[in-house]
Each structure stands twice: as structure tokens, then as C-alpha cells.
Amino acid sequence: MSRANYNDLLEAGVHFGHLARKWNPAMAPYIFMKKNGIHIIDLNKTVVKLDEACDALKQIAKSGKKVLFVATKKQAKDVVSNSVKNINMPYVTERWPGGMLTNFATIRKAIKKMGSIDKMKTDGTWENINKKERLLITREREKLEKTLGSVADLTRLPAALFIVDISKEHIAVSEARKLNIPTFAIVDTNTNPNLVDFAIPANDDASKSIQIIMDTVTKAIQEGLSERKVDKDKDEDSAEKDHEAAVTEVTAEEGGEQEERRTKRPRK
């Protein structure tokens, strides 16, 4: 059974593409028709591609790896940030920091700097600096928080990127391709779907369209996280049972050895 319902996608306006004159010929396989000068996306193709993307994202989440979500356009940023917070995945909804992936070590240093500033407020250092320095440091902390706060828990490169509007986020796409990081994306009729590994043909401008795609994707990731937890609990139970069995076996062996020594003890 498909994860997304055709009629729900239709109602959310997922099928509305861009003006025909702005199209990218590489999107031809996903275009159903042209109506009033606007390309209409084939939602049957959207359902198939969305299912494929969700299955792959579920496996990534189940393996315990992180997916970085990227959406800096106005109509997508709040939708994405609110959806992703529920599954505890990193996201970038402000300006994409150049070198976020290709120069990840430097990004991590900036994130650690936020921690250092926070530590200053608890270890007594904050009281020993003047008012002007405090103001400058506070502004720097706010700037770092705005840009990198949502990726503070990303201690290593993400296993994949999920992108809304690959034309706007072309730098993120380029960095991921250089590092061979799998890319998932909502692709509209004016973009090249061949630039990403998992292209989901859909309207990337309407918030309702982005919302329904995000709801479906985050649900799949949540399934992966839940299955990982179940598997982890099973492994822990199995390890505990193995330990108990081993203890029982050792106890039985020790009891047998003691009994054997008693039977062999010479009578006085």
C-alpha cells in the first residue's frame, strides 16, 4: 500500500508545476500535461517516487544515522523545521553555511564555540569581562545559534540530505555530490531531477504541498526509529538471557565439581 494518497496530494496542490516556458526538459517523464500555460505533474509518478524515498529514509533512520533537512525558502522553512523537530533530525532553514559539508571540521569548531560561550556564563568568566565584551560575545552567540543551532547535535557528516527546491539549495546539492552523500529532494518542473539520487516530483512552492510531503517523509523516518528501538530492546533482552544462562551453567558446573570432590573424599 502506498504511503501517500493520490487524492490527498491532489487536494494539497502537489500537481501544480511552473510555467511551461520555465520548464527543465529533464522533468519530462514526470509531467502529465500542460494546462493554461502551466505544467501539471503526474501524481502517479509522485506516489511511486515518494514511496521509494520513504523506504530508503526509513532504513537510514533504522541504522541510527542522521538525515540533514535543507529548506531556506520562506514558504518551506517553518514547515520543515516544525516537522523535523518531532523526529530529532538536524536541519538548515536559514542561510546555508558555505562548506557545511565539505569543510565540516570548521563548522564543528563554530558549534563548539557556542558551547564555550555558554560555559563562560557558568564558570565565572562572564563576570570578569566588561559590558562591551559581553555584548559582542552575546551577539556572536546569537548569530551562531541562528545559523548552526539546529545542527548542534550533528557530530559527523549526515548519511543523507533531504532538500526542498534544489535550484535554491544548489550549493548544498553540490557539496553532497562531491562527498557522495545520498540526496533526496522535492523537485519541481523547473529543476533537474538527475542532480539528486531520490527525486520526488512535486510542487516545491506551496506550503501545503511541502507539508504533505514532509508529513509522509517524517512518518517513514519515525517508523525506522521505532523499529531500531524495538530491535535494540530485543538485543538487550537476548544479551541478558544469554548472561543468565551462562551464570546458571557456571553455577551448575561448580556444583557438580563440589559434589564430585565430596564423593571422592577418603573416609577416616
Image: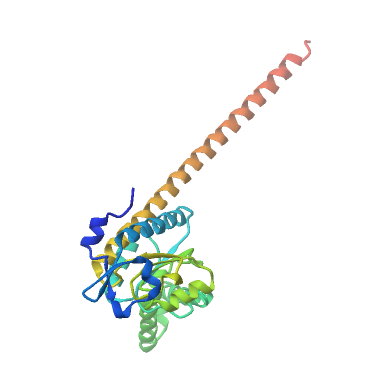
Front residue of 55/200: it is 200
Front residue of 50/117: it is 50
Image position, residue 223 (x, y; %): 38, 51
Q: Is residue 138 above or below residue 205?
A: below
The residue furthest bottom is 132
Which residue is at 38% across, 77% downward?
167
Front residue of 41/108: it is 41
Which residue is at 60% across, 32% downward?
246
Residue 261 falls in image quadrant: top right
Image position, residue 31 (x, y; %): 32, 67
Q: Count numbered badges in the picture.
A: 0
Q: Is residue 174 above or below residue 197?
A: below
Residue 230 falls in image quadrant: top left
Can residue 87 be seen in the rendering of this structure?
no
Can residue 258 be seen in the rendering of this structure?
yes
Residue 248 falls in image quadrant: top right
Image position, residue 59 (x, y; %): 46, 54
Q: Quadrant of the C terminus?
A: top right
